[in-house]
Amino acid sequence: MKIGIVSKLFMLTTTLCMLILVTIFIGQTIFFKQYYANQKVNKIETSIQSFTKDYLKAGEDVPAIQKLQQDFYQENTTWITTLDSVGNIRYTNDFSIDIHLDPPLDKNFSNRVMNIPLYSFIGLEDLQRVRYDLEQGNSILIDGVQKNDTVIPSILAVENNNVVLENVQLSEKLYGKRDAKDPKGSSQIFLKGVINKLQIPEGTIGSNIYTNGVLIDRIKQFQVNLIINENRYSKAEIMDYEENNIHYKIFISPIKDMNGETTYIFAMTSLQPVDEAVQMLGGYYIYLIIFVLLLIVLASFYFSKKIAKPLLQINDTTYKIANLDFSETIPITSKDEIGTLSYNINTLSNTLHSYINQLQEDIEKEKQLENTRKEFISGVSHELKTPLSIMKSCISILEDGVAKDKKDYYFKAMTKEVDKMDMLIVDMLELAKFESGTYKMKMEVFFIDQVIEYICEQLAIDITNKQIQVYKQLSKIQVVANQHRIEQVITNFITNAIRYTPEHQSMMVSAIEENERVKVCVENKGAHISEKHLEKIWDRFYRGDTSRQRSKGGTGLGLAISKNILELHDSEYGAKNTEDGVLFYFYLNKKV
């Protein structure tokens, strides 16, 4: 079964669009989440490197560092902060308490003011509940772990108020151990002191970080891991974390600050937006697929018709061209390859049409040439038949011995006919040479009036015998032509004029300048040539007028030869009837 191009294009386009839709669906449901995460991780890694450079340049400029953290969050939607060597958030004095330690418990920490970050024990939203228990002057007990010269509290107990604040993650690690001594260089320590000052965030830039409980929990967990194993974070790490079905990426990068101490860049970003987007797309795809399928069908049908329409027109037109019908052209409606193809087919059609017309014209010309050849052969046969018949009759008379006293007469008659045949053959050879298309005229400069005067002198006897009065109107002008051949043309024109001019009549020969050309005319008195024969008198052996029969003399090739000579000169020529006779004329180029 034959399937049309519209159906093929429709099926192909629909299949392709469906494949693209399936690919997009699979890509978004399977690979998009991973792609998004990788892109975000790469971006944040680059941003952290830039942040690190700016952080080191800022030194101890706290406002500048807080500004860097804020800009980082706005640009990457990612929390970032810096931690000291034991995992405390740096520059957190806005959410802390200052405690003046009592001397009896530990001489190393006596009379020393200790700053304790409160984010490890309580959230910012629960601060109001214990705020008044942490007033200045209240006595407080500290249970924690000592790391080198730094104490990391795990439990804070306010005496007489029964208020206990606990860093649960650190407490579990501490009290879960059997030995009081930690082999990694940390040990439990108990301190007592008096609260000097409570610092509460009041709209500062750094306060926003305390509202993110997940981030604070991860920082506390990082601190516990760092205390237990200080070499764990010796190089940059990226960790995955999930809470409440939300995925996070945690970035930890250790650096050396200006004092040579280890500082940690801690950043955390949520992958929740992409999770929500993927979940939403899952439900949305049902409606999207239905809509896209409908759109694909309509678009494929329109696309198929749009593409196939010019192809169908091309097919119809080429079918007509194949059957030599060139009447129809393909409309060009676009500038793409189909438009170019349509243009090329139209050009091909016009070219074929032109060549076929030319071929038909050549065939017609060949037919005419064949007819001309037949006419030529017929004319030659006719022209040779008469002299041959005369010669045959003369020979018969001489053989029979009849009219012996007129022997010289018959010999002269035969000689005259031989001369006519010789002249006919010479003219035929000359005409064939001109019509061969290979003959080239050699041009020269000469005075046309001198040529006409010379020819008239050569024909003076014929003019005198018929008592013809010749009038001349000649200008002394130089022309560019082949002198010998132009003499031949003028001789033919004047000879014809003498032949067909009645006795005691006149003829006019002129050479007149017209613009950049010279017009040569030969006009004779006598019988007119009918209009239907004027164009044919230039054909070989043509004698359409009874007044121009063989009895007048000539071979019938003179005007045909003249025509070819003038055409080889690209000369305008012609013949027309005048009031009293016939005028022959031609033009030559004047010497510039």
Image: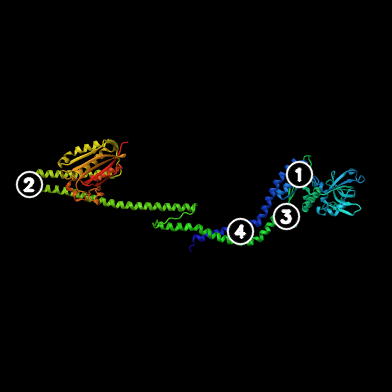
Quadrant showing the C terminus = top left
Q: Which mark sits nearer the N-terminus, 1 or 4?
A: 4
Instruction: Give the CA distance from mark 2 to mark 4.
Output: 121 Å
Callout 2 secondary element: loop
Question: How busy is the neighbourhood of tag 3: few (under 14 within 10 Å), some, or many (20 plus)?
Answer: some
Tell me the amino acid under the disc marked 1: Ile
Residue 361 placed where, x, y %?
33, 52
Disc 3/disc 2 C-alpha distance (Å): 145 Å
* Distance (Cα) linking label 2 and label 1: 152 Å
Amino acid type, label 4: Val
Toward the viewer: 586 or 31? 586
Residue 496 shows in the view: no
The residue lying furthest to the bottom in this view is 1
Q: How is the rendered protein coloured? A: rainbow
Q: Is residue 357 visible?
A: yes
- Residue assigned mark 1: 65
- Classify residue 315 by image quadrant: bottom left
Q: Nearer the viewer, mark 2 or mark 1?
A: 1
Badge 3 amino acid: His
Q: Which mark is residue 285?
A: none
Mark closer to the chain start, 2 or 4: 4
Q: Going from the N terminus, do you reach mark 3 or mark 2 first? A: 3
Identify the residue under disc 2.
403
Q: Are marks 2 and 1 in contact (CB under 8 Å)?
A: no
Q: Which residue does the numbered mark 3 point to in the structure image?
A: 247
